[in-house]
Amino acid sequence: MLQAILYVGHGSRMKEGNEQFIHFIHRLMEQNDAPIQQYAFLEKAAPTFLQSFQRCVEKGASVVTVVPIFLFSAGHVKNDLRSLIEEAKLAYPHVVILCSEPIGPDERVVNILVERLQEKGALLYGNKNDLDTRILLVGRGSSDKEQQADFLKVVLLFLERCPFFTVDYCFLAKAEPNFHEGLKLALKRKEKNVFVIPYLLFTGVLVKRMEAAIKQIRGQTEKNIVLTDCLGYHPNIIQIVNDRLKVAKEISYAELSVNA
């Protein structure tokens, strides 16, 4: 069986965000020995999922493992990607298609959050400065209840890691509280410092909107508002994705053996 890996990202209208994804995928490809490796975007960028899947088949792949580079299993993974996989199964019935889990709640992602705070001057030692700091963790947002629950698991993991911080959370879309409400509430609290962490993989339109909103509100408050970098395609993310890929292969090989 000739193996292929197809890495799938969301896609962005911003060239910078897509370039970050592609650079990350090249790093992943270097760590995997599958003879065929391709990447694709769900929307707003090329190549599309079906275009890249076709390339895998043209190169001789008999087994394609789809790897969703998403933080959570929300609508894009459950609906859009699943629909595309079913379409590929109909078009190429002779090809076995596997799919790994998305990144999900993981302590290694929380460690990235800590790094992002340290980069912007948060001390993280539980001293007076930290006690005068409020964290606003901002998720992408989804109407999917499972995704919302997974994001709350991340918030709890962060609180376990940094119990001396006061932590609020909000969402950029499709869930409450929204970002503007979350930011206003954080600024009403007693803490002088407000660190805003975008729980996103890459720089894109949503981050630019956050930057604009924070810039506008800075002139209306004496609070120190700091926007950290996104999670980015950190080595921890590479490790997690490879772990998810390994589990998907192990489960699927076991199933194939049973059905052989």
Image (cartoon, grey):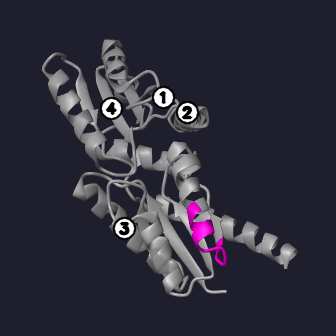
Of the image marks 3 and 4, the number of the one nearer the N terminus? 3
Residue depicted at x 56% and y 34%: 144
Q: Give the residue type that dot 1 points to.
A: Phe
Q: The N terminus lies in which quarter of the figure? A: bottom right
SS of the residue under disc 3: loop
Q: Give the residue type that dot 3 points to.
A: Pro
Judged by depth in the image, the label closer to the viewer, 3 or 1, is: 3
Residue depicted at x 39% and y 45%: 200
Residue depicted at x 37% and y 21%: 182
Quadrant of the rendered image containing residue 25: bottom left
Disc 2 to disc 3, C-alpha distance: 29 Å
Report the residue marked by disc 3. Answer: 47
Report the residue marked by disc 1. Answer: 164
The answer to whether 158 appears left or right of 39 in the picture is: right
Judged by depth in the image, the label closer to the viewer, 2 or 4, is: 2
Disc 2 to disc 1, C-alpha distance: 24 Å
Q: CB under 8 Å between callouts 3 and 1? A: no
Report the residue marked by disc 2. Answer: 148
Q: What range is drawn magenta here? A: 87-96
